[in-house]
Image (tube, rainbow, N blue to C red):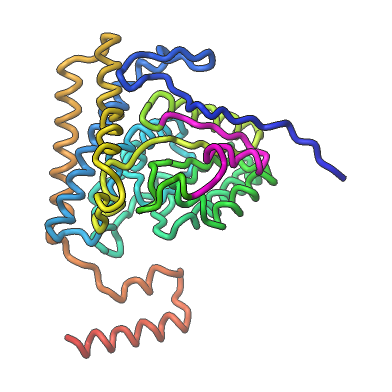
Amino acid sequence: MAIAHEAVQVELEPLQLIAPDGSPTDHPDHDLIALHDRLPALYELMVATRGLDEEFVNLQRQGQLALYPSCEGQEAAQVGAVAALRDTDWLFPQYRELGAFLVRGVDPGGIGLTWRGTVHGGIGLVEKHIAPIAISIGTHSLHAAGAAMASTWLGDEGVTVAFIGDGATSQGDVHEAMNLAAVHAAPCIFYVQNNGWAISTPVEDQFRAPSIAHKAMSYGMRGVRVDGNDVAACFYATQAAAERARRGEGPTLVEAVTYRLGPHTTADDPTRYRSEDELAAWRERDPIDRLRSYLQRVGIWDDALEEASLTRMRELRVHLRAAVVDAEDRPMDEVFDVAYGEPTPALVAQRDELRTELARGA
């Protein structure tokens, strides 16, 4: 028996409410003025994200962190999206979601210890309804789809968000997650930060569809393209997707078109695969400068807001550095104690073997 589905259309032009020069862009479905009360706080969060991101890179260069993936340039995409959600909605991050963590009030010191390689680094995520950071590309999209299905069964009106990059859309796990979520009308948002590059692979080499958002049509879900450097547009796109999900209208694929201004990680050299002209063009679309220009244009901006934003950012940087610099490592065999409530016989054997090797090398 054939199942009839409503035709799904995707606009190629990204949703934009604030232009790169800070001027407002009229849109019939979204009232930018209604967001004015929240914009100063979003600006402060974006400034904090940028400053902390710089501190993370500094710490890695100074040998205090093993690795770090910068989110410079993607602050609006992350802050705008999470600010539109309920605090009880579950986030399933990949590894570049510093702005999302700050919106939820996660201690950046714990995130720093994660990138230092400390076993207990990152404690506090689950308490904020955030799943552990996923390094393996795209696997957490399946977790998000499953959690969304569980919310439906529980009737808790929860929405889950899988944060993925453009490169992850080339992975089979992401296809399976989207298909599963669509079939079950799961309240899940697949939030793709299309930052132009999957490490050194440009986005144009990853698919033949008009956009990533257009892939939603094949799953029978809603697809939305949004200017990822416009915090207001990201807020409203995510809010609309969450509202549809809570009404039982299923998942949404949101493509936030943004740019990674820094390297893929601190182990990467982006000068080997992208031009200075490309980088300069995207710096002209800086999301923080854009929001500041808009706030100045509409009379919300003042020196007190700037000073408060910078003060908060500096405090967080000091806190991060204090938590990370020369932090004591946890016992290496501790990983066996946190895998299960009770270690399995196989894990006990592996732990004992590791202890023997460590003792031999001491």
* Residue 103 percent location from the top left of the image: 34, 36
* Pick the front one: 34 or 23: 23
Point out the image quarter for the N terminus: top right
- In the rendered image, the vertical position of residue 297 relative to residue 265, given as above or below: above
Residue 226: image location, x then y, percent = 46, 30
Q: 240 or 121: which is nearer to us?
A: 240
Quadrant into which the C terminus falls: bottom left
| Residue 8 appears in the rendering | yes
**Residue drawn at point x = 42 percent, y = 19 percent:** 17
| Quarter occupied by residue 50 | top left
- Indicate the quadrant where residue 281 lies: top left
* Magenta-colored span: 206-227
Give the side of residue 115 with respect to residue 126, left or right: left
Residue sitting at 49 percent across and 15 percent down? Answer: 27
Q: Magenta stretch containing residue 179, yes or no?
A: no
* Residue 173 percent coordinates (x, y): 55, 57
Q: Residue at x 34, y 43 (%)?
A: 101
Q: Is residue 198 above or below residue 159?
A: below
Placement of 127 over or under 347, stated as above or below: above
Left or right: residue 80 versus residue 274 is: right
Q: Indicate left or right for 106 with 225 as reference.
A: left
- Where's residue 68, x and y in %? 26, 54
Q: How many marks?
A: 0
Q: Answer with left or right where residue 159 lies relative to residue 302.
A: right
The answer to whether residue 163 is visible is no
Residue nearest the observer in this picture, 239 or 208: 208
